[in-house]
Image (tube, rainbow, N blue to C red):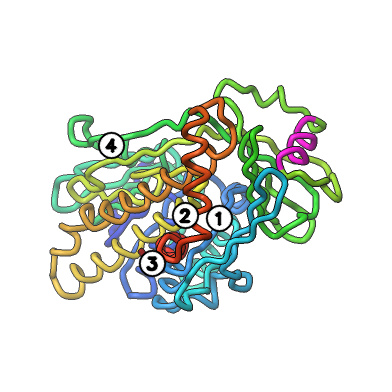
Amino acid sequence: MSVTDENTTVVIVGSGVAGLALGNFLLRSGIDCVVLERHSREYVEQRQRAGVIDPRAARMFREWGLEDRVLDGAPFAPVLNFRVDGETWPFRYVTDDHVDGRFCPQQVLVRNLIDVFVSDGGDLRFEAEDVELEDLTGPRPQVRYRDSTGVTRTITCDFIAGCDGDHGVSRASIPDNVLTRQSHEYGYAWLTVLADAPANHQSMMAIHDRGFAGQFARGPQASRFYLQCPLDTAVEEWTDDRIWEEIEARFGEPVTAKGPITSKTLVPLRSVVYDPMSYGRLYLLGDAAHIVPPMSAKGMNLALHDADVFATAVLKQVKEQDAGPLEAYSATCLKHVWNYQAYAAWFTDLMHDAGDVSYHGKFRRSLARAEFERLYDSETANRLFGEFLTGLN
């Protein structure tokens, strides 16, 4: 059975951070939209992903009137904690009073965005299978999908927001000869580990000749750890004992409480950008259009920036019949994306080259150490770094 009599202004494919933020922005502005998600609500809300909301993104939620409803946790202090060869190097960066960034795991933000969207009357449809996008260059494209009861439905709309990630149907619906893909592989991976263990520190990053390590609190009784490792590493090689041994070696201090390790995942570090970020009436947001290495903590913030730009552009079109911002959507976002890809590549190389010489050698290690120390010695270098960390560059 097929149902074809649905109409809306925007169909949002994907209920990650970009899709849910966009849905809330449009709903608050009186723009009707439908959010389609392939997975169940339980699956989406339990997806474990790290996240830092920078001050620019926090200000964005404030401007849309959502700050108090979706952001959890107190603002964090403008200090990064480093361990360099086992010695603590606290780093206070210049913020010009932009200090309202938050440590906020993505699943927490996602749950909050879902609650607000649904409670405000938003149309969010989980378990939407076999999504197909049609007539993307026509005046009113269509989105066809099979709902949780097995009924095939078709929604006609004005715009489609592709927020379904790197492997979603949205980008795959664009002809191959339209998009240019630019990418960079960093040559190493992170073993990401979630453990039921209180963190020694709220956050800490280690530079060590055995490789980079990171530790971030995930609530009072859990921590997420990151360990630099070769691309050909198998997760099975990393026993719990080996993980704890490596964490203690790279941080140069004992782990106070070693609870059960609940997940281990290998993440190759890479940067990817697709250009343009639109095709006809389909617009790509978040990981569907770009990926940054997790070292930068900018993936979620770039997705939120896309949602902000697109929502504002749709409002201009619908309320004022001004198509200019939508026509400029890709160029506007890509300028921001490339600026932060440059930052992400620099910071990633700096933190990894300064430690393990087996990837890029002793010369690059010495260069990276000099750059790292410059952050402490130069007010100008400190200020530029602070602008990127706060998302205000």
The CA distance from mark 4 to mark 1 is 29 Å
Instruction: Please tell me whether residue 247 belongs to the stretch shown in magenta.
Output: yes
Residue tagged 2: 300
Residue appearing at x 45%, y 32% in the figure = 186
Residue tagged 3: 392
Q: Which of marks 3 and 2 is nearer the N terminus?
A: 2
The CA distance from mark 3 to mark 2 is 15 Å
The CA distance from mark 2 to mark 1 is 7 Å
Q: Earlier in the sequence, mark 2 or mark 1?
A: 1
Q: Closest to the observer: 242 or 109?
A: 242
Residue appearing at x 34%, y 65% in the figure = 308
Q: Do the residues labelled 2 and 1 touch (CB within 8 Å)?
A: yes
Q: Which numbered disc, 3 or 2, marks the residue closer to the eye?
A: 3
Q: Which numbered disc, 3 or 4, marks the residue closer to the eye?
A: 3
Residue tagged 1: 51
Q: Give the residue type at disc 3.
A: Leu
Query: What secondary structure is the magenta-colored segment mainly?
Result: helix
Task: Specify few, some or many for label 1: CA neighbours under 10 Å numbering under 14, 14-19, or 20 or more.
Answer: many
Query: Which element type, helix, strand or loop, lies under badge 1?
Result: loop
Residue tagged 4: 173
Q: Closest to the observer: 251 or 199?
A: 251
Q: Give the residue type at disc 4.
A: Ser
Q: Give the residue type at disc 1.
A: Gly
Write down the region rendered in magenta. Answer: 242-250
> Can you give x and y, in whole percent of width and height, for residue 341 in the image?
37, 47
- Residue 15 in view of the camera: no
- Residue 200 in view of the camera: yes
Q: Which numbered disc, 2 or 4, marks the residue closer to the eye?
A: 2
Query: Which element type, helix, strand or loop, lies under badge 3?
Result: loop
Query: 50 left or right of 132?
Result: right
